[in-house]
Structure formats: C-alpha cells, structure tokens
Amino acid sequence: MTRVLVVEDERDIALGVRANLEIEGYEVTVAHTGEDGLTAAMANRPDLAILDVMLPRMTGFEVLEKIRVYYPDLPVIILSARAEELDRVRGFRSGADDYVTKPFGVMELMLRVRAVLRRTAPSGSSSTPHRERIGTVEVDVANRVVLKNGQEVALTPKAIDLLRALIAQRDRAVSRQDLLRDVWGYATSVTTRTVDAHIGELRRKIEDDPANPRHILTVWKKGYRLRA
C-alpha cells in the first residue's frame, strides 16, 4: 500500500486530506508540526509527502531540505497560502515535485497526488484500481468513472468530486460547510445552495427514485449522508 505523509498544522484541512487519501486507498500518517513531520519521515519513509509551508517550529521548506538529504528521490507536494511566483520558485528549487496554493479543493489535490506518483513511479510498476459500490452504482475512484447497471453515467466534474467526498465519509453525516471545503476549497463565491444543486444532480443520475433517495440522504439541520 502506498504510504503518504501529510504535514499540516490546520487540523480541519489535515482531516479532510487524510479522509480523501484513505478513500483512494493510501496509508496515511499525519503530523501537525515540522519537527513531527520530519521525525515521521525518518522513522518510516513514505512514498509521498504533502507539506504545508507555514508550520510551527520548522517551515515546510526546512522540512523539505532536510528530507532531501536522506531521501533525494522522495516525491513531495508543497501546500501554501502564498501564491506569489517567488514562493513557488523557492518551492521547486527546494525540490518540490508540485506546489498547490490555498484555498484548494481536496479533489484537485487528489489528482495532483496521483499525477506526482505516476510521474515518479518506478518503470513497470502498477496499481490496482480502487472501486466503490453503492447499490447498483459502481464508482471507479481513480479514473472518475461512474457506472449504473454497467452503463456509464454522465456527471459534471464537481458532481463527481462531491460523490467522492461523500464516499470518503460514507455512513456519516457531513455538513454542507464541510462539503464546500472538501470540494470547492473555501471559495467565498460558492454557497451551500451550490452543494444542494449538485446533490440534486447526483440523485437524478444515480438514484432509482430521486424523490425518495435510498443512498444520498438528507440529514436534517446537518447536511447529507451516503448510505452505501
């Protein structure tokens, strides 16, 4: 199983990233300080590290520079609220394989993770596709393909992202605010009504009776729950 180290001091972000990585089939270790992240990397070499820049006691850049001494080929993705060109250049010069700016959608980050791992995978390596079943619906998580009764379902990219976010929290109530964070990133232009609209699209496409859904359930005063 591919091991991913996430070093992020904002615990809500770390939780969302971890949940989505785990639904993708990765083994995840989380650290909330630069020192703890470096210790975790040294104790058990990950296959990929995701580093926030602004970390307590040691910045992500410092962690990256120290990791590179021991693991020069370890794939690393930098997370940062700094979008200026100089910061991005510093990240890549420090040895980062990708640089993702905040706010970001977690699903976008999952795509970056797969892309970095694919680029850095040893020649001839392969991975087993990760599929989830929801009644008569099958979701190919990695390839973003949704099938119902064996036929591909046409969904918008955000609807697929939303479905994947619900899968990551399956059988648990998820608030609209959490879904906004995981799918749209903290974009202030997006409202909870956007979530409701995409939920409606999912129900129309994958539920046998959209008016009486069996899988994508509304949780009163909370949000939604995927019952698989």
Image (cartoon, rainbow, N blue to C red):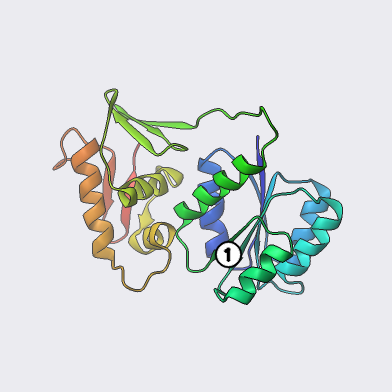
Please report the residue visible at 81 percent of the width from the left and 56 percent of the height from the top. 68
Quadrant for the N terminus in the image:
top right
**Which residue is at the front of the view, 107 or 133?**
107
The residue identified by callout 1 is 11
Where residue 218 sits: x, y (%)? 26, 51
Q: Quadrant of residue 37?
A: bottom right
Viewer-closest of 157 and 124: 124
Foreground residue, 81 or 165? 81
* Residue 169 percent coordinates (x, y): 44, 47
Please name the residue shown 68% across and 63% down the image. Answer: 92
Quarter assignment of residue 58: bottom right
Q: Residue furthest top?
A: 150
Q: Please name the residue shown 35% across and 50% down the image.
A: 162
Q: Which residue lies most toward the right here? A: 69
Question: What amino acid type is highlighted by mark number 1?
Answer: Arg
In this rendering, is residue 134 above or below 192? above
Nearest the eye: 111 or 172: 111
Looking at the image, residue 214 sits to the left or right of residue 143; the answer is left
From the top left corner, tell me how far across and down residue 173 is, in percent.
Answer: 37, 52
